[in-house]
Image (tube, grey):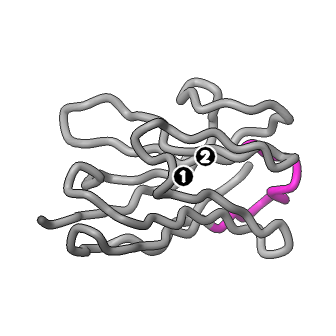
Amino acid sequence: QVQLVQSGGGSVQAGGSLRLSCAAFGHSYASYLMGWFRQAPGKEREGVASISSDGRTIYADSVKGRFTISKDNAKNTLYLQMNSLKPEDTDMYYCAAEFSRGSSLYEADFGYWGQGTQVTVSS
């Protein structure tokens, strides 16, 4: 069983930066596909970025060039560095994990989820 505990997030003005963290307990990240998703009230959850066990990354078109996903296997922690934030990035953000050597940004491919953290970007 993998437990994901998120930290970071908060409120920032447009153009600012935030970093989200996601610590894993119960298993090593090294063999897991990891990802970040976001969801606004009343909308479907959408993939933001993912990183495979061997470091392959996928980004949503809306965040390419602004967000960076990374992981520290020694610390069992996943990160999402968010720069040049826009008001439309305002959402609840979730980290996710799955025991897989594949690469994906589909919600259905992830079985473990963090508790969520709010990101609010004001104009």
Which residue position holds label 1? 95
Judged from this view, the residue extending furthest toward the front is 65
Q: Which amino acid does label 1 sit on?
A: Cys
The foreground one among 123 and 23 is 123
Left or right position of 23 against 33: left
**Which percent across, then down, holds residue 57?**
70, 44
Whichever of labels 2 and 1 marks the residue nearer the N terminus, that label is 2
Taking the image as shown, residue 5 lies to the left or right of residue 98, namely: left
- 26 falls in the magenta region: yes
Quadrant position of the C terminus in the picture: bottom left
Left or right of 12 on screen, residue 56: right
Determine the CA span between mark 2 and mark 1: 6 Å
Which residue, given by chain and number where applicable, does mark 2 sit on? 35
Determine whether 95 is above or below 12 in the image. above
Task: Point out the stretch of residues depicted in magenta.
Answer: 23-33
Q: Where is residue 89 in the image (x, y as percent from the top left)?
A: 29, 52
Q: Tell me if mark 1 has few (under 14), some (14-19) or many (20+) residues whose alpha carbon lies within 10 angstroms of its own.
A: many
Give how far across and how far down residue 102 sits, in percent.
Answer: 80, 31
- Give left or right: position of 63 versus 74: left
Q: Residue at x 77, y 69 (%)?
A: 72
Residue drawn at point x = 81 percent, y = 49 percent: 55
Above or below residue 85? Residue 37 is above
Q: Give the vertical position of 73 relative to 48 (above or below).
A: below
